[in-house]
Image (cartoon, helix red, strand yellow):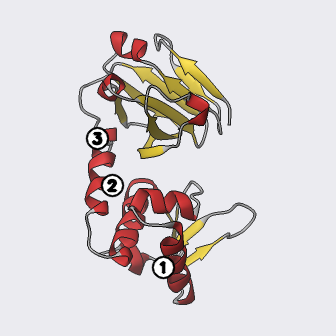
Amino acid sequence: MTTIEATTTAAPLRIRSGHTVVLDEQVLASNSCLCVTAGLVRVWISRPEQEALDATPITLGFLQAGDHLPLDLLRTARLHLQAVTPTQLEAGGPALPPEGGSSLHDWTVALLMIRHLGDAERRIAALLQLLVQRLGRRHGAWYELPLRLTHAELAGLSGHTRVTVTRQLSKWRECGLIEQDCGRERSLRIAPELVEG
């Protein structure tokens, strides 16, 4: 992972796949929002006093073309943008994302609501449903996610331990509701009955 500091966004901000850009508060001085115009980016935060390379990621969401990244969080946290695919962001744009788009705030609220569901199975199923609704693509009889998430990352997003996530995913795999590590790329395929309804 390569990390670079971004202090201005006058020109489109381009991030190569697998690279991370760290936004500092100078970006906030000239912009209140960035719009993703291409690609898929994971947005995470760290405390400003932490070294950027030593920070433990706290994922707030994933944004794709048409989605908005409000920058008000830069007042209290450092924002990291990790490109899942080659990504481009531009400054400005309307205050609200267009129909069908979402904002980082939408992701953050959805993840917070998932963390307050009762049991592990409901939380992890709700997380998969959110990922499929926002990012998934129907591919034959399955939904596929365009990004690889480890069990530890799924645990962080759902508010459970990696062991709990692994146990639940194994249970669903045995029931034929998910498939992992399909083909040459590690991926997660999810049966519609797990995430629809």
Q: Residue at x 46, y 26 (%)?
A: 49
Q: Which of 3 and 31 is in front in this view?
A: 3
Q: Which of marks 1 and 3 is in front?
A: 1
Residue at the farthest front position: 49
Tell me if residue 181 comes above or below residue 36 in the rendering: below
Label 1 sits on what residue type? Gln
Answer yes or no: do the residues labelled 2 and 1 have beta carbons within 8 Å? no
Q: Dot 3: few (<14), some (14–19), or many (≥20) neighbours within 10 Å?
A: some
Answer yes or no: do the residues labelled 1 and 3 have beta carbons within 8 Å? no
Q: Earlier in the sequence, mark 3 or mark 2?
A: 3
Q: Give residue 110's mark.
A: none
Answer yes or no: do the residues labelled 3 and 2 have beta carbons within 8 Å? no
The residue that mark 2 highlights is 111
Q: Which residue is drawn at 55% across and 74% down?
A: 166
Dividing the image into 4 quarters, which one contains the N terminus? top right
Residue 177 seen by the camera = no
Tell me if residue 65 comes above or below residue 147 in the rendering: above
Q: Dot 1: few (<14), some (14–19), or many (≥20) neighbours within 10 Å?
A: some
User: Where in the figure is residue 5, as x and y percent of width and height?
Assistant: 56, 19
User: Where in the figure is residue 189, as x and y percent of width and height?
Assistant: 55, 70
Q: Dot 2: few (<14), some (14–19), or many (≥20) neighbours within 10 Å?
A: many
Label 2 sits on what residue type? Leu
The residue that mark 1 highlights is 168
Q: Would you say 176 lies left or right of 10 here?
A: right
Q: Give residue 105's mark.
A: 3
Q: Which residue is drawn at 33% across and 48% down?
A: 107
